[in-house]
Image (spheres, coloured by chain):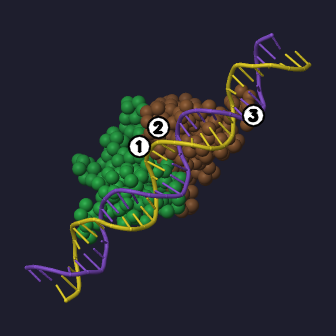
Chain colours: A green, B brown, C purple, D yellow
Amino acid sequence: MGHSQSDKARSRDRILGEAATQIRDAGLESVSVGRLMRSVDLTHGGFYGHFESRSELLAHALERALADGRAASLASVERGARRGFHARLRSFLSRSHRDSRRTGCAIAALASDVARADDRARAVMSRHIEGFVDDIARGLDGAGAVPGDPAHGARDDGDAVLVASAMIGALLLSRVITDPRRSDAVLRGVRERLARLADTGSMRPEEG
Amino acid sequence: MGHSQSDKARSRDRILGEAATQIRDAGLESVSVGRLMRSVDLTHGGFYGHFESRSELLAHALERALADGRAASLASVERGARRGFHARLRSFLSRSHRDSRRTGCAIAALASDVARADDRARAVMSRHIEGFVDDIARGLDGAGAVPGDPAHGARDDGDAVLVASAMIGALLLSRVITDPRRSDAVLRGVRERLARLADTGSMRPEEG
DNA sequence: TGTACATCAGTGAACGCGCGTTCACTGATGTAC
DNA sequence: TGTACATCAGTGAACGCGCGTTCACTGATGTAC
């Protein structure tokens, strides 16, 4: 908490990072300017040297939370043994992701909140949803790929949208359900079924 | 707003109903005792004749919102031409459900909120999630039923969990996405794919 | 390299406001006679 | 059926509190000479 220009940039970054964590943990409305500044060892007055208002902070914090969530997911996949879609699925629908809201996917953590927020917040999350779906679409193209299989590449974006919906929905349900065994079963059940669907490509419209 | 005992019961019911609507529209934290009482044409002081505290009200309002959401869903299916699973799917993943948060499914409206709430709220929603999954499981058993098909009845509860997750997730994503065509496409895409999965039974473990 | 000074990151008292909750009250309800 | 009265649903002033925001300030930074 020095007085130099680089200290200021660092302060702003710490405020944003802490806010991004807090909103994933307790919701957009949970952030109070006074408590937030105290939690990064500053006083509330200084806040307005960094942001115009609490509302402007929240817009930036949402963006940051979404970026941090994606980075954490990629890092988690990197650490694991597997790659690609199956690794993504395992890490996303894991007990550890369920139990670490503060650092996990911000789409899941804040979906209900943003669904009722203003256009600005919804537009920010919309872009990240498209990124999430794109990642999955790329993963699906690689997952059950048999060279020369005419079905390869035939999956359109809609399959990825289904998979994304199920991943977000299952993570949310697992976080609500109080019985730990039932919560685990939701994660495992959806994980296994999505893995199978990706491998067999049985989501293809032509097949039905 | 009379003074009889039945008036009191009616008042409590109106307070709860209004609170159930407000939390689905704007989240658990959005309810203020003063505004809530004003919106049912009473004054704030009377609130404590009906509920011990704001927190106790919220627990009851969550229960009510979940029940109202389920009732609205059943009513919507009754009104339509189709029955069973496909009707449920069409009505749940519809533009009209997406656009009427205040009266729609409370699991979707409040999933992120309850995921971070206390055990009491999570237990209340857990019970309703099990009900939601059971409804779907019953629907799936009827959906692609071919008499004598050995696969009939082989689907376990896990298929219903996948379908429930995708339904909740898709509705949430469609409410966040700002581009109306993209939002529609999410609803339609997931609706069509879940319908096909139910008909072909291609979720069965044996098949993969 | 040393000094004088403008800049500006961060401080903390103060503001008006809406919040949840309490409580003395008013007056309609409904019961006992 | 009529009267006297206890009950209690609903009222509204008052409370202490934390909120977002403002602003005069302090003192370190970093630049001009």
Q: CA distance from mark 2 to mark 1?
A: 12 Å
Quadrant (top left/top right/bottom left/bottom right) for the N terminus of chain B: top right
Q: CA distance from mark 3 to mark 1?
A: 47 Å
Q: Residue at x 33, y 49 (%)?
A: A103
Nearer mark to the viewer, of 3 and 1: 3
Q: Report the residue marked by disc 1.
A: A171
Q: Determine whether B95 is above or below B198 in the image.
A: below
Q: Report the residue marked by disc 2.
A: B161
Determine the image quadrant of residue B142. Answer: top right
Residue B189 at x, y percent in the picture: 53, 53
**Is A151 or B128 nearer to us in this picture?**
B128
Label 3: state its secondary structure: loop
Q: Which badge, 3 or 2, comes first in the chain's sequence? A: 3
Quadrant (top left/top right/bottom left/bottom right) for the C terminus of chain B: top left
**Is B179 or A42 nearer to us in this picture?**
A42
Tag 2 near tag 1, CB within 8 Å: no
Label 1: state its secondary structure: helix
Q: Report the residue marked by disc 3.
A: B2
> Same chain for marks 2 and 1?
no
